Amino acid sequence: MGHAVEPAGRRSSGGDVTEPGFFGQVIEWFTDPANWSGDFGIPNRLFEHVVMSAISVVVAAVVALPLAMYIGHRRRLERFVVSVANVGRAIPSFGLLFLFVLWLGVGLDSSPALRPPILFALVLLAIPPILTNAYVGIQGIEEDTLEAARGMGMSEWAILFRVELPLGMPLIVAGLRTAAVQVVATATLGAVVAGGGLGRYIIDGFAVRDLPQIFAGAVLVALLAILVDLLIGGAGRMLSPRTATRRARTPERGITVGAS
Amino acid sequence: MTGAPFWNWEWVGRNLNLILDQTLQHLWLTFLAVGIGLIISFPLSVVAYRRRALYPPIAWFTGTLYTIPSLALFAFLMPFTGLSTLTAEIGLVSYTLLILIRNIVTGLRGVPPEVREAARGMGYTDRGLLWGIELPLALPAVIAGVRIATVTTIGLVTVTALIGQGGLGALMLGGFRGLYPDLAILIGVTLSVALAVAVDLLLFAGQRWVTPWSRQAGARVVAT
């Protein structure tokens, strides 16, 4: 890393050098220019974290959304959705990372943001919340509404895209939001299996007992997760028709499928 | 990871005690987290139920806690509480709060007003109403919350391996770091999933036994 453990001299120094307290050391870590440039700097680590998370959520959405639309519209295979949700909750994300490493190896020849075992694990974790929420959102639309649409002569495709999708939007976005937050969290754990991203500060800090760096890494990771949560929540409110927002006010955060 | 053959049953045979100990530690950490989570959530939920204005701030606070990635939460605590069970439990309990409070409040709010009116008419006090009427009727939703919180916690306990705890997570991490054979990873994940499924079924059976009048409620995933 570009920055060392707190210099030992500081601890043993006499009264002439004022010793910064723990939070002073955290602030020093944040203000150290070495932590703001290069491969190990905050901008690059943040970039890696966002890239691996975004890729995983997008791939998971491409798989899960059409499936949820099909199942929600046709109202079949519903037990399948319930099973995916339950299995998704039961599998520990931490263990999933190790299973993929066991299968594919760590993948050190790839870029730290694109380690195959981590990406596979992240995609797999993101599918259940997206699938279940989108399914519930589409399936929960009242039969009267669909009857009215059919009575107006809308085709099944038109019903799917102009009625079910807009009305299901609050829960679809809620699912994406849950998935994104979970992926950001698990991407942090990816640092254990040699992944890049902000989790590196915590894991590398553990290795050398650098408490200020561990704390600073935690601040960065928590801020990123909260920011992602707020941004997608805001986007959901903008994308949803007003009636749909009111209807689905209670499950705004979506159906949780495990924390990580 | 080591180069030894994958299906290293000989290692398993020699380390059955280790595997059993980690499984028990896993269950203990989970039980402690959900138990303490319930003790904290219950009064908060009753307060949030009786004074509606208090629900949004409580939901916001526990929701924010829930959003913080587990590794970050443990890392926040590390400088103060070290590599300890306390660090693990503060983090694990934090994650149960959102799930439990949301389910308890939803359950309490689901009690039909006419039932409450009738109980009042029969002379029930606030306390009698809560323990005798509202809570029993809310029980399916409460247990649904306990199920989700428990299954989630079983998964999260594995992460505490990074702060020296971890139960079955310690088998996974040890397998990855070459302390144990690769097989330990698979054993850790399999047993963790098995625990989650078994405890979930047990709680489900318990719910049907305690609330025989609600055979269909609580069976769905859609509970948070």
Image: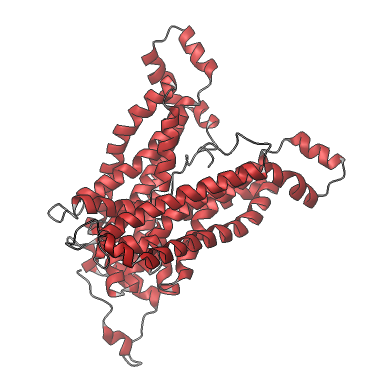
Q: Is residue B109 left or right of residue B146?
A: right
Task: Give above or below for B5 relative to B78.
Answer: above
Residue at the far left in the pictured view: A109
What's the residue at 39%, 59% (across, down)?
A: B158
State the colouring used for the structure image: secondary structure
How many tags in the picture? Answer: 0
Q: Is residue B70 visible?
A: yes
Q: Position of residue A104 (x, y in %)?
A: 19, 50
Task: Give above or below for B11 relative to B218.
Answer: below
Q: Is residue B140 left or right of residue B18?
A: right
Q: Nearer the viewer, residue B200 or A15?
A: B200
Residue A202: which quarter of the image?
Answer: bottom left
Q: Quadrant of the N terminus of chain B?
A: bottom left
Q: Position of residue B68 (x, y in %)?
A: 42, 55
What's the residue at 15%, 56% (across, down)?
A: A108
Residue A9: which quarter of the image?
Answer: bottom left
What's the residue at 58%, 39% (across, down)?
A: B218
Q: Position of residue B125 (x, y in %)?
A: 83, 49
Q: Position of residue B46 (x, y in %)?
A: 68, 51
Q: Is residue A178 visible?
A: no
